[in-house]
Amino acid sequence: MPDRSMTDLILRNTRLAGGDDATVDIAIVNGKIAEIARAISSDAPFEDAGGRLVVPGFVDTHIHLDKSCILDRCRSDGSLQDAIAEVAAAKRAFTEEDVYARGRRTLEKAIVQGTTRMRTHVEVDPRIGLRSFEAIRRLQKDYEWAIDLEICVFPQEGLLNDPGTDELLVRACERGADLIGGCPYTDSKPHGQIARIFEIARRFGIDIDFHLDFDLDASWMDLEEVCRQTKAHGYGGRVAIGHVTKLSALPPARFEETARRLADAGVAVTVLPATDLFLMGRAHDHNVPRGVAPAHKLLAHGVTCSLATNNVLNPFTPFGDCSLVRMANLYANVAHAGQPRQLSACLDMVTTLPAKLMNLKDYGIVVGNPADLVVLDNRDPAMAVAELSQPLLGFKRGRRSFSRALPVLNPPG
Ligand SMILES: [Zn+2]
């Protein structure tokens, strides 16, 4: 029996995804999970989860804190090109304090929605310089009590066509960017950008996360070049691609061939349902295509997939509460994924699978890992997605990071 005299807290009466239906207690010592067992006998302080599901926090692999909450500064016609142009114009006026304040608002929303790990993309180019990067670095440090934030610097407006951007990306990597991203679809030489991003990533030994194939024209895909270079550089398991809405436009045989190519190369996919639904299909005035890549079908071919937030309250996505439960539900609804095992897979795509995509080595409710624990108001993983169950209580490294009260009905009398 473990020494329980040092136990700081016990989260009692929890249910774990993938476990049997029995409830377990989770003992926390020094911010780490020390024991998982039925009815742990101890005098340590405890919280009662009431038989509810506990997850190791949500993992958001793709969000843009730096350009969130700028709707009041932009007018947009709703197209992708217009969103890029509007944000590019607004970005010129961003100060470090402004980015910090808006990023904080968005980050705090994510924390109370139960997100404990996050990868934020941050734009770097000669207009914004490293102002956004420096602001987000401060947020990374100031909020480490609640969330582990990874910074992915990337050239939203192109790299080879935008002199000065390359040097800034390199400088950001020297100053501690966690990884590098790309956006080949805005570059004058998309394959040249892909090659250069791999070069910088290898120089710094960091992972890569591209914005890719963000339209519904299936006649060409940058994905093939990314898979080719991933294999050539031995980078399998270290490359992710976001959006990839072209996958939704492929007929079954080509879809399966492409899924196998991704799995074989070790390239992961992040689907961004809110943005993809909002920006795709704009050329149609009826029978509008959904434009959301079928992530749950990619899983069946062995591709690592995540569902993520992307933009919050800006021209790319004028919505957002940073809830990954909502994103899982939105995806399931749009993708016709309503079977219990499919709904359960949608929860995996905002928890364990994004953790795998980000190569997190200490994620999960396992003895020895940090006690990152979030209680959801449901007993069942599939139903938590179906019913949009709220996160009620969160711990980061064993310390309570947020709580949410249950609603109360007030019947007459
Ligand atoms: Zn994005």
Image: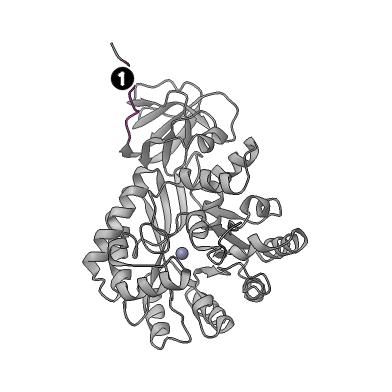
x, y percent for residue 399 = 32, 39
Residue underneath mark 1: 410
Can you say whether 190 is above or below 365 in the image? below
Q: Secondary structure beneath disc 1?
A: loop
Q: Residue furthest right?
A: 253
> Range of the magenta residues?
404-411
The single residue placed furthest to the left in the displayed view is 97
In the image, what residue occupies the spot 30% across and 72% down? Answer: 90
Q: Residue at x 37, y 81 (%)?
A: 168
Is residue 191 rendered magenta in the image?
no
What's the amino acid at mark 1?
Asn
Q: Position of residue 337 (x, y in %)?
A: 63, 43
Residue 132 x %, y %: 31, 70
Image quarter (top left, top right, bottom left or bottom right) of the C terminus: top left
Q: Position of residue 136 (x, y in %)?
A: 31, 64
Figure check: 300 above or below 259: above
In the image, is 358 to the left or to the right of 142? Answer: right
Q: Nearer the viewer, residue 46 or 146?
A: 146
Decide if residue 258 is on the left or right side of residue 100. Answer: right
The answer to whether residue 245 is visible is: yes
* Secondary structure character of the magenta stretch overall: loop
The structure residue drawn at horizontal position 66% and vertical position 76%, both measured from the top left corner, is: 232
Residue 65 placement, left or right of 245: left
Seen from the viewer's position, the closer of residues 63 and 19 is 63
